[in-house]
Image (cartoon, helix red, strand yellow):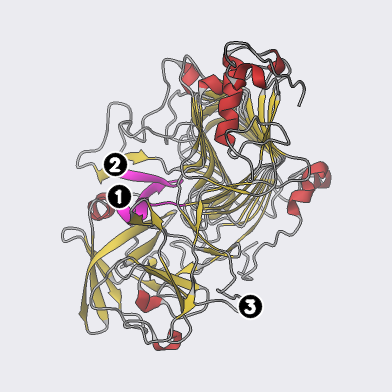
Amino acid sequence: MKIFCILLLSVYTLPFISLNSYAADIWVAVNGNDNNTGTKNSPKRTIAAALRQARELRRLNDPSITNGVHIIVEDDEYVLDEPLFIRPEDSGTASSPTIIENAPGAKPVISGGVAIANWKKVSVPITGLPKEAQGKLWEAPIPETGSSPLLFRQLWVNGNKAIRARESDTDEGMNRILSLDKQKQEIWIPVPASGLPKYPGQMEMVIHQMWAIANLRVKSIMIDGNKARLTFYQPESKIEFEHPWPAPVIDKEHKMNGNSAFYLTNSLSFLNKSGEWYEDMKADKVYYWPRKGENLANAKVIAPSLEKLVQVNGTMERPVSYVFFKGISFEYTTWLRPSQQGHVPLQAGMYLLDAYKLKVKGTPEKSGLENQAWVGRPPAAVELAYVNHTGFESCTFTHLASTALDYTRGTHDDEIKGNLFKDIGGTGIQVGVFSDEGFEAHLPYNPPDLREVCTNEYIENNLVVDATNEDWGCLGISAGYVKGIRIEHNEVCDVSYSGINVGWGWTKAANAMSDNIIRANKVHHYAKHMYDVAGIYTLSAQLNSIIDSNYVDSIYKVSYAHDPQHWFYLYTDEGSSYFTVKNNWCPSEKFLKNANGPGNVWENNGPMVAEHIKNAAGLQTSYKYLLNGIKVNTDYQPINH
């Protein structure tokens, strides 16, 4: 606190915001009260109330804000009922920023989770439960949000992610689809050894489709001997059977690696091992089989409630500026689209709204185009639009079901530095426009007002680990149409698909992208589930862009991949143009240059790169503490190279 004064007036007391507290430091603590003054001894209860106090200080031009406003958050968990919303009125300036930061030594958590309590061991047989699980389960009532039971797709027990009950206990144990009928919109599968219920209930099917997955809600099951026919709900059924890329693989001519693998999930009949759970919406109960050492009588069991924790929204003319987060953890978000509408992505987690093969090829912009697609964007735990000079430093993003941090559009000169991204269902860090819902995905994005384009964004010294563990087709770090982005000295590992992606659009045409730099990053242990993959991947023309001095290694072996050899260290995909690719270390020269445009220069990439370049990639010395306690490939999955 810089200054504190009270003026006693003979007629009335002025509002405390303007005069009662000249504090540039506003404190927040879980035992505080939002009616408090915001001093260390009289803290606010919520960050939202502290932001309002800061907003009023700025509105009234209080002299205490001359050197900035610090919202100082004490240790503990701050559970939100709604996302924290930051507006243009919350903006600071270069000399007077607003900084939301941890108190010295504190590790505050902003959470969207709901505790599940009142667990008891089930003492009676449960109809439909496998016999090996009978007598092993615990149950608790589903918590309510408002007047409705909470729908959720993830569960964490003492900070460890539990497994939504599934029919194949391991990914390597997944079965393959037998056939599909596009007209009837049905898929035939082998009946698993554990059998299938007569009615699907809340069952879902997850299909491995080349470089993306599909989540389909099962509508009906018809068993015929040792095989079963599944149909699905709309809208995902129509999209799944009409969209050409990436489609489920039927390998009749044995040119690939067999038909697409799949697993079934979210049925009580699949709950057959410890660590699995099932939410029975009809019975209003959650069932869980504890892992060894877990005691549900005193365990901390969290289900996510919110899809977004923080939303920072300005406008083109009134952006949010100079607002920063430091030393804050963002935890426990949900991802509900697959439960409500299914989820059939095109690429990078961007889900299809409509897609189909063209009977006659070509559009005015692309004469050889043989399909069209329109996509939506998954939610992010922390999402920003129309902002500049904002940032996240020394923060932790964990236990999140979809994207962790997303700068969507209209942003510039922001910094993401020294953060840990761990246990992320979708993409870790995402920046830039991909395709708006009304903008066909193959069109080159080049808006007349370039303020729409995410420009001069800095992503450096972040660790992204165990991301993409829900949507396997997402990325560690993903950028769409961006200009002047710098992705430097990050480490990305244990991801299901590619490590770092820059670009969108599959086009050689002029577009908004240029001057992008991917430098000195370390990408390893990637392609955990999907192929057509690379440590570093690009799309479309990007004038004056550089991929330089990166380290790429350790591609997972995936027995069920559509093409077991279709993995790469560096991959410049369709339309990639005007890149300089140099001095990138990898164990061999396994690269793909697919339908590239002009102007690409490749120099000195592979095992011959100097040792000092190899060793300098990844987190710089002062950020290596982020690796403390991090374990990679805990399942001992085989490695290609």
Q: CA distance from mark 3 to mark 2?
A: 52 Å
> Quadrant where the N terminus lies?
top right
Q: Secondary structure at mark 1?
A: loop
**Was residue 343 drawn as part of the magenta stretch in this picture?**
yes
State the residue lying farthest toward the front: 10
- Within 10 Å of disc 2 (Cα), the crowding (few <14, some 14-19, many 20+) is some
Viewer-side residue, 491 vs 385: 385
Q: Which residues are magenta?
A: 334-353
Residue drawn at 76 percent across, 20 percent down: 3
Viewer-side residue, 461 vs 277: 277
When the figure is inspected, residue 388 is found, relative to residue 214, above or below; the finding is above
Residue under pointer 2? 371
Residue drawn at 26 percent across, 79 percent down: 227
- Within 10 Å of disc 3 (Cα), the crowding (few <14, some 14-19, many 20+) is few
Q: Position of residue 215 (x, y in %)?
A: 36, 58
Q: Are marks 1 and 2 in contact (CB under 8 Å)?
A: yes
- Within 10 Å of disc 1 (Cα), the crowding (few <14, some 14-19, many 20+) is some
**What label sits on residue 293 in the rendered view?**
3
Q: CA distance from mark 1 to mark 2?
A: 7 Å
> In the rendered structure, which amino acid carries the disc numbered 3?
Gly
Say which label, 1 or 3, has the lower sequence index.
Answer: 1
Kindly report which numbered mark, 1 or 3, lies closer to the viewer in this rendering.
3
> In the rendered structure, which amino acid carries the disc numbered 1?
Pro
- Residue 118 appears left or right of 295: left
Question: Which image quarter: residue 17?
Answer: top right
When the figure is inspected, residue 374 is found, relative to residue 246, above or below; the finding is above
Residue under pointer 1? 244
